């Protein structure tokens, strides 16, 4: 099937589409110029060989030979979108290469927004030697969330046992990562290293971040309470910030109307090497996506996601005036394309498939 542009595929009628496959591919092409660069590099290495031998014999310093492995290939991140019918036959296909990270996130958001409008399931995968399902999104459901019970109370209990503070009220839920206080040994080591940084003190005083770093360094030496990372969930927004000793910084506010979904999943980067990143907790927005920087997300990411989804849906349902409806729309069965309301434990009225299962 001939590939079309992403805009054309997303704008077409979706009649007969059972599901959408969104694939992230790490593509690469050999750079012939790398042969010239390698030749010049070897020539320089031969010229410097006597100096390298002297350093190896009379110095304890570790010699690191620069690697050019990363320059042998030109790599890029390619998105492939395929619309499948109930028999897994492709109806339309697009291959899209974003120009940068923002463009890549915008393309993913466009796919999810289209799927949400048409009530389609999106299976997002990281392609490679073995394809890995990163996330399954359910169009037609609030926050594209899986049709399962989201137990806010249970998730909060698990996270509190893991060391997070959770404060719940009628109009907001606040998650606090309390941080870890520095030990006496760490403070002694920090003081020793701090003496070496005294010549850099005038430069650090020139910027807000530098002055903040000095203040926090002093607080660490005194054994003061550590930095806290805070996530505030309200019906209309999700806000993150850091705080310590009455000071607040790095505040980031996400408009609830912009949020398409919340995921804890691995991803491919848009950097030069198209780096594969371990699972992170992320808000996927229509105009911008961002990670929720909580240290506990590395071990409790799925539980954090469940809590944020459950709390957001609960808070929105209590404030209908915001226009952020939690009403469940119809979702197409990914097996037979029948449109029905997916609820926890429900089954497709056409083919009998359980809600939440995918081919």
Image (spheres, rainbow, N blue to C red):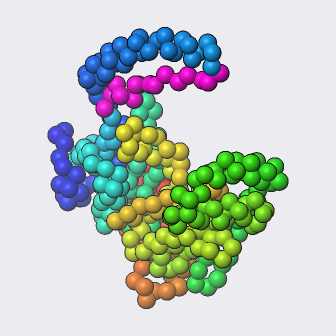
- Regarding residue 58, the answer to whether it shows in the image is yes
Residue that protrudes farthest toward the right in the picture: 184
Query: Residue 321, how many percent across, how many down?
Result: 43, 89
**Residue at 46% over, 51% down:** 135
**Residue at 49% over, 44% down:** 277
**Dominant secondary structure of the residues highlighted in magenta in the image:** loop
Q: Toward which corner of the image does residue 113 lie, by quadrant?
A: bottom left
- Regarding residue 331, the answer to whether it shows in the image is no
Q: Toward which corner of the image does residue 38 lie, by quadrant?
A: top left
Of 33 and 311, which appears nearest the observer? 33
Number of marks in the rendered image: 0
Q: Which residues are magenta?
A: 60-74
**Residue at 62% over, 66% down:** 229
Of 44 and 230, which appears nearest the observer? 44
Query: Residue 201, how many percent across, how many down?
Result: 60, 57
Of 176 and 153, which appears nearest the observer? 176
Query: Residue 307, how many percent across, how many down?
Result: 60, 67
Q: Is residue 141 left or right of residue 79?
A: right
**Residue 98 higher or lower than 129, as above or below:** below
Q: Is residue 288 left or right of residue 232?
A: left
**Residue at 43% over, 37% down:** 131
Residue that protrudes farthest toward the bottom in the picture: 321
Q: Is residue 85 left or right of residue 222?
A: left
Residue 73 magenta: yes
Looking at the figure, which quarter contains the N terminus? Answer: top left
Residue 95 magenta: no
**Residue 82 higher or lower than 321, as above or below:** above
Query: Residue 128, how many percent across, how many down?
Result: 41, 33
Looking at the figure, which quarter contains the C terminus? Answer: top left
């Amino acid at each position: 099937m001939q590939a079309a542009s992403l805009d054309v595929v997303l704008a077409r009628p979706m009649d007969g589409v059972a599901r959408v496959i969104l694939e992230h591919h790490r593509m690469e092409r050999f750079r012939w110029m790398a042969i010239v660069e390698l030749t010049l590099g070897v020539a320089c290495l031969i010229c410097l060989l006597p100096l390298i031998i002297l350093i190896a014999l009379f110095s304890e310093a570790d010699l690191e030979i620069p690697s050019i492995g990363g320059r042998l290939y030109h790599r890029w991140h390619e998105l492939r979108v395929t619309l499948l019918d109930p028999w897994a036959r492709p109806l339309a296909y697009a291959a899209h290469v974003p120009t940068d990270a923002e463009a890549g996130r915008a393309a993913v958001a466009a796919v999810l927004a289209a799927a949400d409008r048409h009530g389609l399931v999106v299976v997002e995968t990281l392609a490679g030697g073995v394809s890995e399902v990163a996330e399954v999104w359910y169009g037609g459901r609030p926050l594209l969330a899986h049709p399962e019970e989201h137990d806010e109370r249970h998730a909060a209990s698990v996270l509190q046992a893991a060391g997070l503070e959770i404060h719940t009220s009628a109009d907001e839920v606040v998650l606090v990562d309390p941080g870890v206080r520095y030990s006496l040994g760490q403070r002694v080591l920090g003081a020793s290293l701090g003496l070496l940084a005294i010549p850099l003190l005038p430069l650090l005083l020139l910027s807000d971040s530098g002055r903040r770093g000095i203040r926090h360094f002093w607080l660490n030496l005194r054994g003061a309470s550590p930095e806290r990372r805070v996530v505030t969930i309200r019906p209309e927004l999700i806000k993150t910030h850091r705080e310590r000793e009455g000071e607040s910084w790095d505040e980031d506010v996400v408009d609830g109307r912009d949020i398409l979904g919340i995921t804890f999943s691995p991803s491919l980067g848009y950097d030069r090497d198209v780096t594969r990143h371990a699972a992170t907790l992320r808000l996927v927005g229509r105009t911008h996506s961002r990670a929720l920087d909580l240290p506990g997300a590395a071990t409790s990411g799925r539980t954090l996601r469940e809590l944020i989804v459950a709390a957001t849906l609960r808070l929105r349902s209590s404030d209908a005036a915001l226009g952020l409806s939690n009403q469940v729309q119809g979702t197409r069965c990914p097996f037979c394309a029948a449109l029905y309301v997916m609820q926890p434990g429900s089954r497709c009225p056409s083919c009998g498939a359980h809600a939440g299962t995918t081919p």
